[in-house]
Image: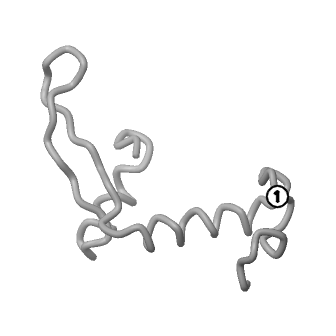
Amino acid sequence: MPEAQFLEELLGMERHKMVVSRQTNGSEGKPAREWFFRHDKIAEFFILQTFLEHPSNSQYGNSASIGWDV
């Protein structure tokens, strides 16, 4: 996830142990931090919320057609 765009949200989720950060070397050898969801279920929750808020952006149209009980 892009840190610059979502830093405040990432730090909040880190406090609640929903995401973890890892230090890596960036493209120019500079230290960079990468963020990952701790579990797939957490990532799926946020993906589902995006589809529910913007169903027209989904290739499936609505969540019922792909078998989600909402």
Residue at image position (13%, 18%) is 29
- Left/right placement of residue 3 relative to residue 63 reads left
The outermost residue toward the top is 28
Q: Where does the C terminus fall, quadrant-wise? A: bottom right
Instruction: Work out whether 47 lies above or below 27.
Output: below
Residue at image position (35%, 50%) is 7
Q: How many marks?
A: 1
Residue at image position (77%, 59%) is 54
Q: Position of residue 64 (x, y in %)?
A: 82, 75
The foreground one among 8 and 19 is 19
User: How was this image coloured?
Assistant: one colour
Instruction: Work out whether 21 lies above or below 42.
Output: above
Residue at image position (35%, 43%) is 3
Q: Position of residue 4 (x, y in %)?
A: 37, 39
Q: Position of residue 45 (x, y in %)?
A: 53, 72
Q: Position of residue 38 (x, y in %)?
A: 30, 66
Badge 1 local density, few (<14 within 10 Å), some, or many (20+)? few
Name which quarter of the figure residue 48 lies in: bottom right
The residue wearing badge 1 is 60
Q: Amino acid at mark 1?
A: Tyr
- Left/right placement of residue 59 relative to residue 29 reads right
Instruction: Work out whether 65 lies above or below 37.
Output: below
The foreground one among 15 and 70 is 70
Name which quarter of the figure residue 58 lies in: bottom right
Q: Secondary structure at mark 1?
A: loop
